[in-house]
Amino acid sequence: MEKWVSMPKVELHAHLNGSIRDSTLLELARGLGEKGVIVFSEFENVIQKDDRSLTEVFRLFDLIHIVTTDHNVITRVTQEVIEDFAAENVVYLELRTTPKKNESVGMTKHSYLEAVLEGVKAVSTVDVDFRPHDGDVRITGNSPPINATCNGSTRKKIYVRLLLSIDRRGTAEAAMETVNLALEMSDLGVVGIDLSGNPTVGEWTTYLPALKFAREQGLYVTLHCGEVPNPKEIRSMLDFLPQRIGHACCFEEPEWEKLKSSNIPVEICLTSNIRTNTIPSLDVHHFADLYSKKHPLVLCTDDSGVFATSLSNEYNLAASAFGLGRREIFELTRNAVEFVFADDGVKRELTELFRIAEQKLDQ
Ligand code: IMP
Ligand code: ZN
């Protein structure tokens, strides 16, 4: 694993609350159990298990939603998730989250997001660059470059950008509210919109006006696409030409053709696809075909907490399942710099970082 942990990595598909640490979830659930909000024993085994079934995964999401309804918890989870990714050498992280309201604790979607931002600012183990820069002007600018040397000691740095998720259970109005919130927070690191949630719920066209508006206003858009067989929806999503899509599991030949000719990058989440039974096994995973056709791809975790994985583990899985060496995996992550939702200055800095890392690759 060490060779994957030490490799610089780009993570583009990580749901904030799905990336919660087991230990934190356990501690928070125990606290809620003591207060009588949940029956702790009903969740204890599921939290402590690595190999969760699909039903258990959804039970865990239910629990996560119960424990993450407090500003302090959101802040803590955000800080920990970023520190965990940074600890395994993720140098660029896009975190996505669904803004939530909870009147009983005075939480609005706006204050939820402020709590997330507090978490970003609270990260202490690495320097965090989370504010978008002014277009192309900045190269290293006023924040220290990656792995900056300060007073003789080297500090690691991670870029963090936020995407707001539109939940497929919500209304068109709620989706528009999310887009407006993203625009309001665009100076604070919110760069795009994601469409996610239960793929069997709702019609994606409900969210089309909000997604079109997001794009017109300069936000990036990525869509969870093809998690269940729904060719009409998949084709319509591809016609929208999002900047990226997540998963692309249940495609048939016409959708593959459309995807390949569009060149839309795909966020691949191996463990998630297997755990949710979206793909029966890695030897029939579409990664192999897309990779051999040189379609733009990026390996991601989806929900590292819920699926008990890490980005290093996803790299390790891909290497062994598809016979890829260290260099191939390195190139895969380096190529992902092209489709990050950040300006050219950030891309240039990441490119330089990967250039330096490449020199050490074969040592
Ligand atoms: P949050 O948005 O930070 O609360 O992250 C958890 C949420 O992300 C879940 O409640 C889902 O709405 C969404 N999510 C996580 N994993 C998946 C997935 O595999 N498919 C679709 N939606 C997902
Ligand atoms: Zn996802």
Image (spheres, rainbow, N blue to C red):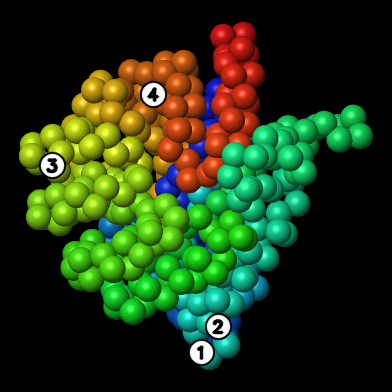
**Towards the viewer: 145 or 120:** 145
Q: Quick one: label 3 or label 2, which is nearer the N terminus? A: 2
* Residue at 29%, 78% in the rendered image: 171
Observer-nearest of 146 and 73: 146
Residue 98, relative to residue 253: is it above or below?
Answer: below
Mark 3 neighbour density, 10 Å: few (under 14) some (14–19) many (20 or more): some
How far apart in space, not on screen, are marks 4 and 3 (Cα)?
27 Å
> Pointer 2: residues within 10 angstroms few (<14), some, or many (20+)?
some
Front label number (3 vs 2): 3
Residue 183 picture location, percent across and down? 50, 66
Q: Which mark is residue 107?
A: 2
Q: Measure how far apart labels 4 and 2 are at the Cα level.
A: 43 Å
Q: CA distance from mark 3 to mark 2?
A: 41 Å
**First reached walking from the N terminus: tag 4 or tag 2:** 2
Q: How far apart, in angstroms, are the residues tagged by discs 2 and 1?
A: 6 Å
Q: In the image shown, does 258 or 155 lie closer to the viewer?
A: 258
Amino acid of disc 4: Ala
